[in-house]
Image: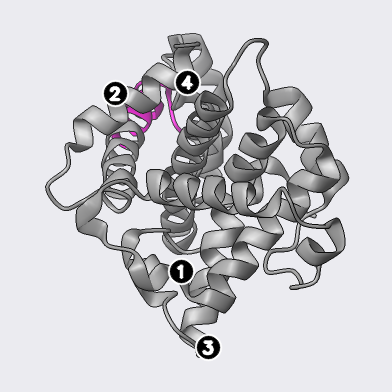
């Protein structure tokens, strides 16, 4: 089972990936697996906060993805209609309403689309929930974390392709805040970089991160939607309760 920080190692998840997930075939199946792999935890967290037990939450998420596959629900998806996070959450909520009256065995009957460890999911959930937080706010917060993770993963993949793995690993902790010159000096020493050069590298990495984040957000929005507004909302839900 991969860790919380490593679970988004898939290709960038965008509305274009939803389009690829339509219908049957190898390409559609792979696109669906990528979507499921990237976004199962925000959906699982919503189910748990909604009031479902751990096993039922896992069943609901698996059942929703099975329904997407079997009924080709993405055939009705349209990027021009709004946000990908809204589309997925609305679909899950509809699925939960439909399934709550059915037997557990019926929910499990369709198989599994995405593989995840229910016990580890509970560990993540226990560490991520906040007292008094609504299911919808928790979903949005986990969605924001997922998008941020994907933007970082994009930078990591690019760094690896350029043979800059060590530099990325050293600079990554500074993405979320400024360090002192002493911090830069210490972190840059193994790379043969002085504090000034390391600081410049961090600032460049932050600029690339902002670009990567905008690209990730743009890929989950309608073409004419406000990227800045969505990023501002993500920062709001990550910053506290609303």
Q: Are marks 1 and 2 in contact (CB under 8 Å)?
A: no
Q: Are marks 4 and 3 in contact (CB under 8 Å)?
A: no
Residue picked out by circle 2 = 232
**Residue 136 belongs to the span the image colors magenta:** no
Query: Between disc 4 and disc 3, whose residue precedes?
Result: 3
Query: Between disc 3 and disc 2, whose residue precedes?
Result: 3
SS assignment at label 4? helix
Q: Position of residue 209 (x, y in %)?
A: 34, 38
Q: CA distance from mark 4 to mark 1?
A: 30 Å
Q: Position of residue 110 (x, y in %)?
A: 74, 73
Q: Residue at x 63, y 48 (%)?
A: 96
Q: CA distance from mark 3 to mark 2?
A: 37 Å
Residue picked out by circle 3 = 26
Query: Between disc 1 and disc 2, whose residue precedes?
Result: 1
Residue picked out by circle 4 = 238
Q: CA distance from mark 3 to mark 1?
A: 17 Å
Q: CA distance from mark 1 to mark 2?
A: 30 Å
Q: Is residue 242 above or below residue 231?
A: above
Residues rendered magenta in the picture: 193-204
SS assignment at label 1? helix
Query: Between disc 3 and disc 1, whose residue precedes?
Result: 3
Give the quadrant of the C terminus.
Answer: top left
SS assignment at label 2? helix
Q: Foreground mark, 1 or 2?
A: 1
Q: Are marks 3 and 1 in contact (CB under 8 Å)?
A: no
Q: Residue at x 76, y 54 (%)?
A: 59
Q: Residue at x 41, y 57 (%)?
A: 158
Q: 80 or 108, which lies in front?
A: 108
Give the quadrant of the N terminus.
Answer: bottom right
Query: Between disc 4 and disc 1, whose residue precedes?
Result: 1
Q: Are marks 4 and 1 in contact (CB under 8 Å)?
A: no
């Amino acid at each position: 089972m991969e860790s919380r920080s490593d679970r988004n190692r898939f290709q960038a998840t965008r509305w274009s990936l939803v389009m690829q997930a339509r219908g049957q075939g190898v390409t559609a199946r792979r696109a669906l697996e990528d979507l499921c792999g990237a976004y199962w935890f925000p959906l699982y967290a919503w189910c748990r906060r909604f009031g479902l037990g751990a096993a039922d939450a896992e069943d609901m998420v698996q059942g929703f993805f099975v329904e997407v596959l079997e009924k080709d629900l993405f055939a009705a998806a349209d990027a021009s209609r709004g946000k990908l996070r809204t589309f997925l959450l609305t679909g899950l909520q509809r699925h939960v309403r439909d399934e709550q009256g059915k037997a557990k065995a019926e929910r499990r009957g369709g198989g599994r689309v995405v593989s995840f460890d229910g016990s580890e999911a509970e560990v993540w959930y226990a560490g991520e929930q906040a007292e008094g937080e609504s299911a919808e706010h928790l979903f949005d917060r986990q969605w924001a974390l997922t998008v941020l993770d994907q933007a970082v993963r994009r930078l990591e993949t690019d760094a690896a392709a350029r043979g800059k793995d060590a530099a990325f690993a050293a600079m990554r902790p500074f993405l979320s805040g400024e360090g002192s010159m002493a911090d830069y000096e210490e972190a840059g020493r193994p790379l043969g970089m002085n504090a000034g050069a390391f600081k410049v590298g961090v600032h460049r990495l932050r600029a690339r991160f902002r670009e990567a984040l905008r690209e990730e957000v743009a890929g989950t929005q309608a073409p004419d939607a406000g990227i800045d507004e969505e990023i501002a909302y993500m920062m709001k839900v990550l910053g506290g309760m609303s």
